[in-house]
Image (tube, coloured by chain):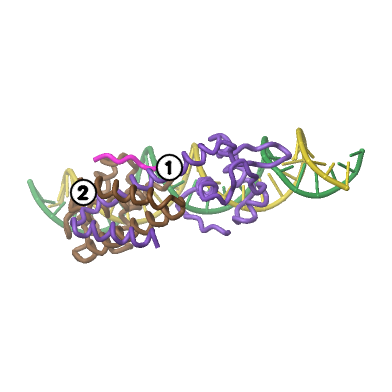
Chain colours: A brown, B purple, C green, D yellow
Amino acid sequence: MSISFDPTRPIYLQIIEAVKKRAVQGIYKCAGPLPSVREMARQMGVNPNTMSRAYMELEREGFISTRRGEGSFITEDPQRIDSERRQQAMAARARFVEEIRSLALEPGRIDELLEEIKDEVTR
Amino acid sequence: MSISFDPTRPIYLQIIEAVKKRAVQGIYKCAGPLPSVREMARQMGVNPNTMSRAYMELEREGFISTRRGEGSFITEDPQRIDSERRQQAMAARARFVEEIRSLALEPGRIDELLEEIKDEVTR
DNA sequence: CATAGTGTTCTATCTACATAGTACACTAAA
DNA sequence: TTTAGTGTACTATGTAGATAGAACACTATG
């Protein structure tokens, strides 16, 4: 459950991404509760203030809703989750295409790479 | 020529990546000169101190060599460049595979995505 | 030699990020 | 009502990144 953070990027941004990813994967259910700020901070090994910042930003984006004294909950809109999944898939594709183009690989090498991906991803 | 930096990551790290990318693409030739610290800083719109930090790190990694009073030069070892290319390709593949897996897409959607990539990247 | 253009070093300042600690406001449940 | 568990707010501290500005050391060139 613990996370290894990229030290070159703000932790609170990486927390936001992790929460969205878990919602997309179904680890956190639509409209379901999230761990409390303090509990999630303990789990991820960060300061509660940092976790609070991440939750506040997630709420600002409408991805979660928090009710004082009750806790935080994933959005009740299932389309919001699915939209996030599609968005992430498109972003991943765009990033990858840009990276490959910038490497000026030979066409044969590109085909190899795509085959390797197909094997790995469907395994 | 100007670069748009990701505000969530240190500029000097993004400069390092940009220089390596340009060397891989052949924009900067093996053993060839780089723009001076001040000139490159002007081109990229950053402070010369920030550019100097990027150049110092690139030298520490052995990717460039700098000679006081003369300038900075890409490594003379062509294998160093090619190694960088292969390394970046492998890293891009690994990142993409991990991203796709984490999205829990349906197999059909994965095939679509790979087809789209094949089309885009060979276009 | 003088000059211009290199890389390098240093101090100072500003901002964002992360942490520690404390306190407060609200809700649910005993 | 009391208690425990929520989210929220605040001050303080430390660190890293980026900038500004100045100065220094070296090299090539005229």
The numbered dot on residue A122 is 2
Q: Is residue A6 magenta?
A: yes
Residue at the image point whose x is 33% and y is 45% from the top: B94
Residue at the image point whose x is 62% and y is 37% from the top: B65
Image quadrant of residue C21?
A: top left
Note whether residue A105 is visible.
yes
Left or right of residue B63, residue C5 in this image: right
Where disc 1 sits, the SS reads: helix
Three-letter amino acid code at the position of disc 2: Thr
Q: Work out whether residue B76 or residue C21 is closer to the camera in this orientation and state it.
A: B76
- Subunit of label 2: A
The numbered dot on residue A57 is none
Q: Which residues are magenta?
A: A1-7
Three-letter amino acid code at the position of disc 1: Arg
Q: Residues within 10 Å of mark 1 (few under 14, many from 20)?
A: some
Q: Is residue A34 magenta?
A: no
Provide the major secondary structure of the magenta segment.
Answer: loop
